[in-house]
Amino acid sequence: MAKIFEQNAYTKEIETKIKEIDPENKTIELEDAIFYGKSGGQPGDEGEIIADGQKIKVNETIKAGESIKNILENLNGLRKNQKIIARINWDKRYKYMRMHSALHLMCASISLGVTGGQIGYDKSRLDFNDPDKEIKKEELQEKINALMEEDHEITYEYIDSKILESQPELVRTMSVKPPSIDGKLRFVKIGNVDFQPCGGTHVKSTKEIGKITIGKIENKGRMNRRVNILIND
Ligand SMILES: [Zn+2]
């Protein structure tokens, strides 16, 4: 299976084939995946499959090992190896891309361990190990908006996972090991601002994120200060 979303997160539609069908779970797997599989705090995608003129809703897409399972509304007449068109709900996915890149900028602006995170449509969040309450809302908001304004390019690199033996600090999330494929890790690079292993989908430059607002900062325990972020559209 080719993970198109990893190479080009902007592919909205593709003609491909059904690789596997699982009638019990109403899921199919495609030869070329443009839908991101829910993982690493980024939600899966929604969209539709068009097969012989019939439209079938894709309700959710999840990562299962190396494959992406597309959960469909129904499997009406679909068969293995059938040619189909897959179309993504771009409004949602594009928002997730902007949110994901915004969270990396937040990560780059706070030099504390990350204990959790979740991307959402209306707001996203990162949790930090911040026992001394170092994070200041206004200061953080200004910093992220400045980085966004500076228009840093966002690119991907595949690097031998051994790099983490000498540079463990590249992993910002505490206690979560990034998954390596054939000994390689996918890194997301935001100009000279941020560089960390990540399998998610991002925008091409920080300017695309738009202006952000830091929402509530919540105390969720000693090792867990939750910082919410919103995009002002
Ligand atoms: Zn990421």
Image: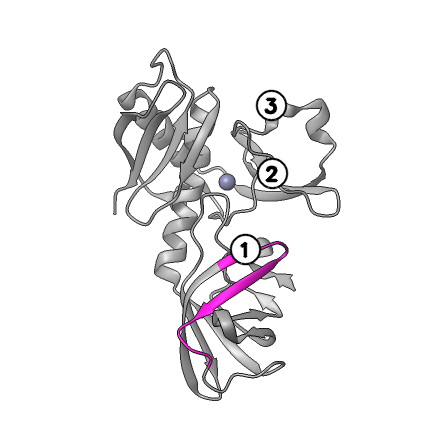
Which residue lies under the disc numbered 3? Answer: 169
Q: Would you place residue 232 above or below residue 107 in this image?
A: below
- Residue 32: where, in percent of width, then height? 60, 67
- Residue 67: where, in percent of width, then height? 61, 60
Q: CA distance from mark 3 to mark 2?
A: 13 Å
Q: Would you place residue 105 above or below residue 201 in this image?
A: above
- Residue 28: where, in percent of width, then height? 54, 71
Query: Are dots 3 and 1 in contact, CB under 8 Å?
Result: no
Verify whether residue 195 appears in magenta: no
Quadrant of the rendered image containing residue 180: top right
Which residue lies under the disc numbered 1? Answer: 63
Residue at position x 42%, y 36% from top?
A: 117
Verify whether residue 74 appears in magenta: yes
Q: Secondary structure at mark 1?
A: strand
User: Which of disc 1 and disc 2 is earlier in sequence?
Assistant: 1
Q: Is residue 150 visible?
A: no
139, 39: nearer the viewer: 39
- Magenta stretch in the rendered image: 62-75
Q: Residues within 10 Å of mark 1 (few under 14, many from 20)?
A: some
Q: Would you place residue 131 above or below residue 108 in this image?
A: above
Residue type pointed to by label 1: Lys
Mark seen at residue 178? 2
